[in-house]
Image: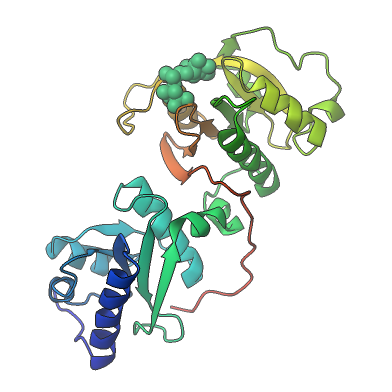
Amino acid sequence: MPRAEANPQLNALVRSARDIAKEVRAAAVLMLAEVPLDFAAISKVFTETRFIITSHKPEVQEAAAEDDLPCVMLSHEPQTRQVQLSVALIEAIADDLVPTGACVVALYSSFDRKDIDSVSVISLTEHLAKLTTRDLQRLETTVPLGTLRRVVDLAVEIGREGREGKPVGTLFVVGNHRKILAMSHEGVHDPFRGYQKKDRAVSNPRVRESVKELAQIDGAFIISSDGYVISAGRILDAKSEGLTLSKGLGARHWAAAAISKTTDAVAIAVSESTGTVRIFQGGAVVLRIEPMDQAMKWHDVDTEPPGD
Ligand SMILES: Nc1ncnc2c1ncn2[C@@H]1O[C@H](COP(=O)(O)OP(=O)(O)OP(=O)(O)O)[C@@H](O)[C@H]1O
């Protein structure tokens, strides 16, 4: 495959990235590339640090594969560089290419459309605490963003705080609630039965507290698209045949994958053992959020992506 020539600017930036990575003990150097470069030659500079390519361009992904280098594939959507880097880092963690808490040096183009012109040092702990609304928007779900964001926030809080010093795991299924009810059965007597609608809104702080308390019971919370708790303690009956999940994920995560495969609902699982929140869509993990020490902040991205 033909490769773009490396110019002196790129060579200088690559060497700087290598030196910075060494200085800050970065776990990897991540290059967000727009055109296929001679990645094999560039990787020779990184003798002590892992070199990862990321791109939404198929020709760049092919070039990385040809050069035998790890590549995080981005989907083709108009996004800001910041969002592309966020997504790439989340995916790199999910693929076990870099550990959470690590530091990564990123090489990308921010002022120029194609030529790499910038180097950033990104601390993954701080970075991942700043999920952008677009991280959720890109999921393209029928569930309104407001509902999704509230439930994800709740899940992250449960994963981070647990209850009375004990870790707590739980499961939320959001959207298409009639179908989800039909595809599940009562595990415990529904603690929300008989409550008025306003006392079941996930936007209500009192309801959020109840959900956190009830997260300790077995089964899943079923949440409607418009953000009301429909039921709690439901055992999902969807079959997990034909699905693949990472090693170490148990029954709760298989149930989340299965229900998101058989319906267009979004399943959000909080792991009891690690506090990690995984968002499932179409039978697979589409977003993974590691537990943070500090509260997660949502950042709206208003800048427009650079044109193609
Ligand atoms: N089909 C299901 N529907 C709803 N909840 C389920 C289902 N299967 C399991 N669970 C819930 O998952 C809990 C724990 O299961 P398990 O430990 O196997 O899950 P896991 O995926 O390993 O998650 P964790 O990381 O939290 O341990 C059960 O106690 C139950 O509350």
Identity of the residue drawn at 80% across and 36% down? 205
Q: Give the residue displayed 57% in from the left and 17% down from the top.
A: 219
Residue 158: percent from the left, percent from the top? Answer: 61, 33
Question: Is 171 situated above or below 57?
Answer: above
Task: Please indicate, yes or no, whether residue 211 appears anywhere in the rendered image.
Answer: yes
Q: Position of residue 102 (x, y in %)?
A: 38, 56
Image position, residue 202 (x, y; %): 74, 35
Q: Is 308 displayed left or right of 116 in the figure? A: right
Residue 30's x, y, as percent? 32, 66
Task: Classify the position of the C terminus by image quarter.
Answer: bottom left
Q: Quadrant of residue 49?
A: bottom left
| Residue 32 shows in the view | no
Query: Residue at position x 76%, y 17% from top?
Result: 192
Q: Is residue 160 above or below residue 190?
A: below
The vertical placement of 256 against 183, above or below, is: below
Depth check: give the residue in front, 156 or 162: 162
Report the front residue among 34 and 276. Answer: 276
* Image quadrant where residue 152 sits: top right
In screen coordinates, is 150 left or right of 252? right
- Name the residue nearer the viewer: 225 or 161: 161
